[in-house]
Amino acid sequence: MINNNNEIVSFDPSTQKEIWRGKIFNDKQLCEVVKTAKVTQNKFELLGFEKRKEIIQRFAQLAKEDTDELAGVISEENGKPFWEAKTEVNALTTKVQATVDAYAERAATKLKDMPGGGKTSVTRFRPHGVMVVLGPYNFPMSMPNSHIMPALYAGNAVIFKPSERTPKSAEYYVSLWQRAGMPEGVLQIVYGNEETGISLVSNAEVNGVLFIGSRQAGEAISKTIAHDTGKICVLEMGGNSPLIIWDYNDVRSAIHIAIQSAYISTGQRCSAARRIIVNRRISDNFVPALVSAISNIIVGKPFDTNPVPFMGPLIDQRAVKQFISDYEELLKNGAKAIIPTQILSNIGENFVKPSLIDVTGIEISDKEIFGPLLQLHFADDLEQAITIANATKFGLAAGIVTQNRENYELFFRKTKAGIINWNQPLTGATTIAPFGGVKASGNNRSAGYLSVDYCSYPCASIEDERAAIPETLSPGLKY
């Protein structure tokens, strides 16, 4: 949160105790940061890929060695269970090889002989220069890293502004890069709120903006820099993702996919299933099993061991109030609570009960409800189910559970999303594939394997070791 002294204060969402405090950067400081980044970037580019790879590999090794400490910082500040925080730390290390492989595949220097002899067409990939990365609070290390690591490997300088809700995690993350030997000034961190971010991306010396967060914030960034056509703008802005449960061999497998899709990270994942569309013919078997599974989800503090929780708290009171408001709006519009939500004040004020609500046949807002709430629709046929699934302006993730490949292929053809899964949770992502959405979820510049496509640009050259005049001059010329 921001206090009256222009400070950011971070609190443990489980206990609401203060864990970090720091000053918001002013405009003068931001200008100095950008100036430093511009100067150091030139030297960093000349360092070359091999030297930069050595730094990245040392970073990954340090992250592996410090896994428990890093995960502890994430759990303390974000609230996710310790076991889950460790999976986030692991993503920092697996990103390395994927980054190196992506550049080798998509951005290697290419030479081709040209007709006539002597001349060579050369395509090289160059860094843009100074890149601003604006990170989210739900994955305070791994999601910014999905931009930062490939940007650094390409030879860019990076200015990282983390979410004001998770500055401590970001500070620790940047310190790893410094310990790994990152040259001073190449990766800098700044602290601030939304206005700080807007001021930073508006700087004329910034060459690119890499953003992960809400639709509202992404639109504000896009409008701010719309006049600057030379600025790379990469936006990942969440979703209202559907999961169709159509048929299955094993109800437990279908339940697992639904729970992992909707409730992991307390529903605070951009790719989480917000809507579940169930074949009415199997609903008498599936829905009671789903209700039982949701009711048995263990909610607790991140370091609890007996029992170990699946879900922790929402990030803060602002998030809790928004979540409860969105839930109550659905009820006012005619939705029926199958598993009502409530604040679990016996654990803490930021803990909420995972809930399930029937919204079949009612008009609801197409919005991303960021929390553990699953909206249930019943469908009489697959075409109807697909129509319901596609009734959203977002396009991040979508999935179907079915034994029939033809059902999946029909769903795939008729669905527009950046991630479309078959018999798998929506929330799983891999570093060897693209990550990101279409439509209102983003601008098609995926944050996964294809990050090379926006962290560098192709530069085409025609090269000849000597200057020579052609044997035949163009008409009208005489030398």
Image: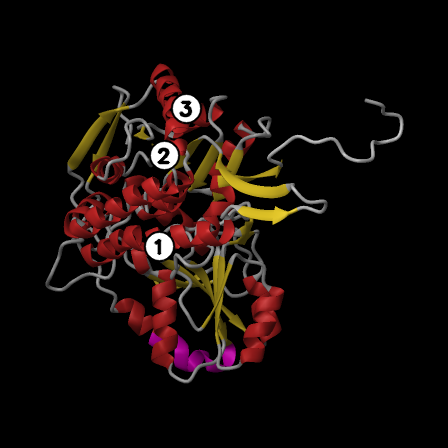
Identity of the amino acid at label 1? Gln
Q: Which residue is situated farthest in the top direction here?
A: 28
In the drawing, does residue 156 fall left or right of residue 295? right
Residue where numbered disc 1 is placed: 97
Dot 2 falls on a residue whose secondary structure is helix
The foreground one among 74 and 57 is: 57
Q: Which residues are magenta?
A: 280-289
Q: Position of residue 209 (x, y in %)?
A: 47, 34
Q: Quadrant of residue 289?
A: bottom left
Residue visible at 36% across and 17% down? 32
Residue visible at 55% across and 45% down? 443
Q: Position of residue 474 (x, y in %)?
A: 84, 31
Residue where numbered disc 3 is placed: 38
Dot 1 falls on a residue whose secondary structure is helix
Quadrant position of the N terminus in the picture: top left
Magenta highlight on residue 285: yes
Dot 3 falls on a residue whose secondary structure is helix
Magenta stretch, overall SS: helix
Identity of the amino acid at label 3? Lys
Quadrant position of the C terminus in the picture: top right
Q: Which residue is situated farthest in the right direction here?
A: 476
Q: Position of residue 371 (x, y in %)?
A: 35, 52
Number of residues whose C-alpha sits closer than 10 Å to that of mark 3, classed few (under 14), some (14–19) or many (20 or more): many
Number of residues whose C-alpha sits closer than 10 Å to that of mark 1, classed few (under 14), some (14–19) or many (20 or more): some
Marks 3 and 2 sit apart, C-alpha to C-alpha, by 15 Å
